Image (cartoon, rainbow, N blue to C red):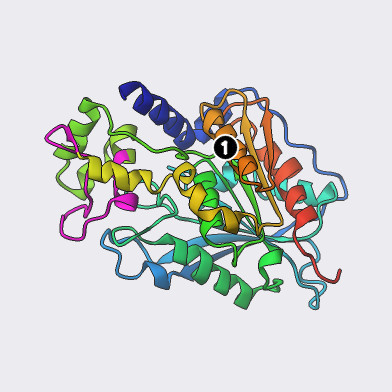
Amino acid sequence: MKTRWACAAVAFLLASQSTDLQAASPQPSTAPIAAVARSVTVDRIKVHGAALEGNLEGEATDRDVVVYLPPGYAADPARRYPVVYALHGYGLTVDGFAGLFKAPQSVEGAFASGAPGMIVVLPDTQTLHNGSMYSSSVTTGDWEGFLTRDLVAYVDAHYRTIPDRRSRGLAGHSMGGYGVARIGMKYPETFGALYIMSPCCLSAREAPPAETAAVVEGVKNREEATRLDFLPRATLAVAAAWSPNPKKPPFYVDLPTANGAEDRSVLARWAANAPLSMLDQYVFNLRRYQAIAIDVGDRDGLRVDAATLHERMDTFGVKNTFEIYSGDHGSAVASRFQRNVLPFFGRVLQAGDQ
């Protein structure tokens, strides 16, 4: 049990430190942007999340969002575009994620290399405990509702989108990859294609090691929580998302341990949020997608679960592609986004009249 938690924890730690890993690892270079590449327009906006109102954790309901508009957007006011929503990993903000995949340069490079025009949207889902898990919880707020209703409705109302599921894609890296798997299973009426990059948290978790559990149980207030090391803080993030309890201030969570003893009922609630556990229930939803892609680095500790997700989809006749590339968790995010992710959506999303 301790070994299993340790493996999951190391993978999640790598997920939260993607920027550091990228700096420390050999970098597959982003394809050079052609001399004739045209700049994208970058909009920084706030989107109100009605779905987040009343959350017990006090998370902001007005969220930062970055929107990349393709070259020529302003010049052709009659043209409408597909939209790709991209979800960041644990411990990152929208700006940290943009830095990880070198936006806007990687977006411009994709267009310069032949990817058709599309709108790219990056929402910020940072929370008290460093990540929303893209889940719905009375403690953190209804992040599924924010992404699938509030954000999509705002973008469709304020930009020239093609407001159709067949023209919307969902991508994400690490915790964002988990978010794509989770939301993709549940909301095929909103999105038409999925790209799951190095997903974390696919399999059921056990309780943390005794020393970590003791630290988490001993935290008394929000200020202490923000000073926690990675494993205790991530444990609180998972509990806030997957085992909320509105009668347990100040954090409004049920922890997986009490006085060091495991609470199997809490762990069962966590397991219910693992995509590898959820998949059987959502096979018919997954079969509705135009295309699903999964990729992961050959030196990424998350590659085993990613491969299992691919194999399980294959077993149930869910069409998907799977690729293991040369790299660790953070080393190839920018080049993959430019060379693989945006071209993938350019091929599979309905673009309408050009």
State the SS at label 1: loop
Q: Nearer the viewer, residue 26 or 140?
A: 140
Is 349 situated above or below 267?
below
Neighbor class of circle 1 (other Cα within 10 Å; few <14, some 14-19, many 20+) is many
Q: Position of residue 237 (x, y in %)?
A: 33, 46
Q: Nearer the viewer, residue 353 or 272?
A: 272
Residue underneath mark 1 = 198
Q: Nearer the viewer, residue 225 or 254?
A: 254
Magenta includes 351? no
Residue 334 visible within the image: yes
| Residue in view at x 57 percent, y 37 percent | 198
Is 233 situated above or below 161?
above
Magenta includes 254? yes
Side of 157 where 123 appears, left or right: left
Side of 63 where 196 appears, left or right: right
Is 130 situated above or below 5?
below
| Quarter holding residue 256 | top left
Side of 239 where 306 appears, left or right: right
Side of 21 where 156 appears, left or right: right
Q: Nearer the viewer, residue 241 or 60?
A: 241
Q: Position of residue 220 (x, y in %)?
A: 14, 45
Highlighted range, magenta: 235-262
| Residue in view at x 50 percent, y 45 percent | 178
Q: Position of residue 322 (x, y in %)?
A: 68, 37
